[in-house]
Image (cartoon, rainbow, N blue to C red):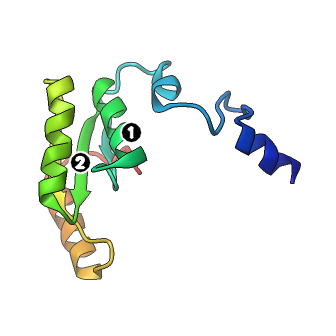
Amino acid sequence: MLETVKYLIGSRGASGFGSKSTAEEVTETCPDLRSITAIITGATSGIGAETARVLAKRGARLVIPARNLKAAAEAKARIVSEFPNSEIVIMALDLSSLSSVRKFVLDFESLDLPLNLLM
């Protein structure tokens, strides 16, 4: 119970970060992520969009899987408008469909990119 309360009020844990830490704060110590490829589900809105924005700011290559490719393209455009050198790949993925997941995996493998982060 006490640990839950500590988490909810934002107390920092062993990592030095807590529930109130931002993506900006967490990535400050690793400002150059150009060697990192990150697949970020949910990158079209909310926490996923902010995570994608900050990883792009730090130079990571992003793969944005989405059911709604228009929303993914809009998310990409927002990031590129702020960080023009961003490398962002949009790919179709519906996590409720196993065949879509299989196709995504095959398509991702065909890009011959490393996978360093899956969020």
Tell me where residue 8 appears, x and y as whole percent.
Answer: 72, 44
Disc 2 target residue = 63
Q: Earlier in the sequence, mark 2 or mark 1?
A: 1
Three-letter code for the amino acid on which mark 2 is drawn: Val
Instruction: Give the quadrant of residue 77.
Output: top left
Tell me where residue 35 appears, x and y as whole percent.
Answer: 30, 30
Q: Badge 1 local density, few (<14 within 10 Å), some, or many (20+)?
A: some
Three-letter code for the amino acid on which mark 1 is drawn: Thr
Disc 1 target residue = 51
Tell me where residue 111 appears, x and y as whole percent.
Answer: 14, 52
Residue at point 50%, 18% (across, down): 29
**Nearer-the-camera pick, 59 or 52:** 52
Q: Which mark is residue 84?
A: none
Instruction: Give the quadrant of residue 85.
Output: top left
* Secondary structure of the residue carrying numbered label 1: helix
Is 7 on the left-hand or right-hand side of 59? right
